[in-house]
Image (spheres, rainbow, N blue to C red):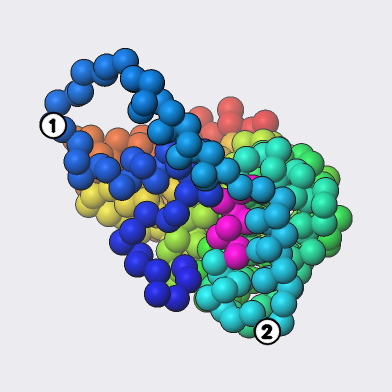
Amino acid sequence: MASGEDPEQPRQPRNMQGLLKFAMEATKSEDAPNPAQLQPMDEERRRFLEEALKSLTVNVIEELEKAMNVLLDNESNEDAKTEAIETVIDYVQDMDTANDFLKVGGSAIIEPGLESPSSRVRSGTLRLIGELTQNSPFGQKHLLELNILEKLTQLLGCEPSVSQQAMHAISCMVRHYEPCLTAFIEIGGLECILACIQTDDEKLRIRASFLIANLCTEHEPLIEEFVKLNAVERVMAGLQPARSYDAKLETALSTLNLLTESKEGIRRCRASDTFKQKLETIVKLNEGKKECQEQLEYAQSLLKRCYSGEQEGADR
């Protein structure tokens, strides 16, 4: 956010989508308690609206070029660069614009952004990577060719604001795009994800667990790979029963349900002296609580799979 900008005010719109969001945020306090009766728009109001929209029309390429110039200028301060990244992110949320941005050399701002001494600029750059690559094979291929995956794994060890966004960027790059996932595995990426399971950063742990679960769902052979890397033991180490809904607990139980879809995963769970007791405690503390239904079901599933003699049928 630029210096002096009121954080309570909606961001100024830069495009039609932004205009709609701006208008909704700016007028939400005026909303009537009951639905309004829509009336046909008269010609005068229609002309006024058309002129207002025309006044907001901008040259997207020019705006992106301005933002890039700020980001590539060593004399630009942190606030200016942070605002410039936000400008780029606003525009590239449209996939066509994101692809055009990369085609005209927009990726030139990625590496300097990741190397910035400012955590705000690094965090913003990581968010931008997520926008450019999420569900976009074109963006994933383009950024894979920048060879930034190793740098992303290094940023997992930074302050929370950066490491959490690094995990998000990695997730966007490797999911649903096998060339990126293969390259990530080759540089030890799976081990990096697992290392995040045992950090003190709860949000990072949860994001790491979600990524493990998503990758195992997309690529079944990875279940065995994670098990070999002691994923079961790492997830179990942070497993703590809770009396109420706990996102960290639910994510851990969900991940263990995936990892125990192999015999070796089950064997490792059974080797723990405390795992069964923890599962039984979770069931006892969560029975009858609607908000805990999923973590209760995960715990019950693990008890059945690991300790009822039915584990032989879980092998794939």
Disc on the earlier residue, 1 or 2: 1
In percent of the image, x 52 and y 45: which residue is there? 56
Q: Is residue 47 visible?
A: yes
In the rendered view, would you say 254 is above or below 67? above
Q: Amino acid at mark 1?
A: Pro
In percent of the image, x 31 and y 47: which residue is there? 26
Residue extent of the magenta highlight: 84-92
Horizontally, is 315 left or right of 22 in the view?
right
For the stretch drawn in magenta, what is the main secondary structure?
helix
Asked if residue 88 is among those painted magenta in the image, a careful observer would answer yes
Dot 2: element: loop
Horizontally, is 176 left or right of 180 in the view?
left
Q: Locate residue 179: give its quadrant.
A: top right
Q: Residue under label 2, please give it.
A: 75
Residue 263, percent from left and from top: 62, 40
Q: Nearer the viewer, residue 249 or 5?
A: 5
Q: Residue under label 1, please give it.
A: 33
Residue 163, percent from left and from top: 56, 68
In the rendered view, would you say 236 is above or below 285? below
